[in-house]
Image (tube, rainbow, N blue to C red):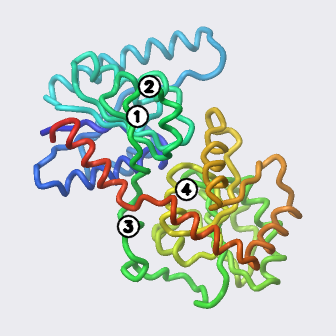
Amino acid sequence: MKLLIAASGTGGHLFPAIATAEQLSRHQTPCHIEWLGVPNRLETQLVPGKYPLHTIQVEGFQGKPGLGTLKTLARLLGSVVQVRSLLQKGNFQGVFTTGGYIAAPAILAARSLGLLTVLHESNALPGKVTRLLSPWCSVVAVGFEETIQRLPRAKAVHVGTPVRDAFRLAPSALPPLQLPIPDDVPLIVVVGGSQGAVAVNRLVRECAPAWFEAGFWIVHLTGDSDPDAKSLSHPQYLALPFYDNMAALFHRATLAISRSGAGTLTELAIAHLPAILIPYPFAAEDHQTVNAAAFVRAGAAKVFQQKDLTTEMLTTEVLDLMRSPQRTEMAEAAGRLAIADSAEQLAKLIQKTVGI
């Protein structure tokens, strides 16, 4: 049986798709998976070697309608024809997509052939493609329960958002951190998502001296686009562009300062890690703020808009939270939001829907 997975762009779209694909590969019924992506995006690094990768030229509709809109529409129609041909020639039984603009040609092509389609929407606020095309999907799996109310015309089910395999292991089963951090010190982890967060990085470096004085350690994942990433040096400070063993790092941490992409929030919840969330202000339709609001309502996080957050505010908020019993309550609330077997649930849903 053959399944085409359409997932492209950032880790928020790719990691849940990869986790689900790995779960499908473990199923007792053989499943052949191939991938649909876009050239020069993250999937060209993560997918080859695991699954055959097909690429198409497609992009989202940006800005006001005009000549550029017509070009984007023409490209979309061309990509639908390409995907339709791929599905026919490959004898695929169904399509699974995690949303974003690549989902549009995948869903439209599958619909034109009468193939079954499963769409996963990880954000609390569904994206434009999800809102428009979800009624044409066989089923829509959602990461936040409240998202179901925002998709009234779709058959939607809450399964959470799949995470990387390591996050489903017990902390004792994870590889050691291999970072020079003492066992008994409070640890702050700063993470800006798969693309980093230069504005947050700058703010954290300004706050850091007060946190060092309080005895806190910081692991700062700066991303690879921050020109000042190496500007701060201190024995209690580790700056890394990325770090592979994120599950162990989150389990070791005392507090996270983070963007609020759906994938990162899911990992924070599974690790029972309280967080100060700073939504990415330029995310489509400000969906990261909607994600963060769900965690705030649950008592698992605090949220601050980047434009409103000052060095003094963040310094004080972290100092107060690290010393407060509220942090333990937030950790427990985060754990209640976690769906650790999301990948298994989603894989079973795909198997049931597509017939794999």
Q: Are marks 2 and 1 in contact (CB under 8 Å)?
A: yes
Q: Amino acid at mark 3?
A: Arg
Circle 3: element type: helix
Residue behind mark 2: 58
Query: Alpha carbon of mark 4 to alpha carbon of mark 1: how far?
Result: 26 Å
Query: Alpha carbon of mark 2 to alpha carbon of mark 1: how far?
Result: 7 Å
Residue behind mark 4: 265
- Give residue 177's mark: none
Left or right of residue 258, residue 141 in this image: left
Query: Alpha carbon of mark 4 to alpha carbon of mark 3: how far?
Result: 15 Å
What residue do we see at 46% from left, 67% from top? 244
What residue do we see at 76% from left, 79% from top? 323
Residue behind mark 3: 168
1 or 3: tag closer to the N-terminus: 1
Residue behind mark 1: 38
- Few, some or many residues within 10 Å of mark 1 (<14, 14–19, 20+): many
Q: Nearer the viewer, residue 157 or 13?
A: 157
Front position among marks 1 and 3: 3
Residue 52 lies, with reference to residue 226, above or below; the image says above
- Few, some or many residues within 10 Å of mark 3 (<14, 14–19, 20+): many
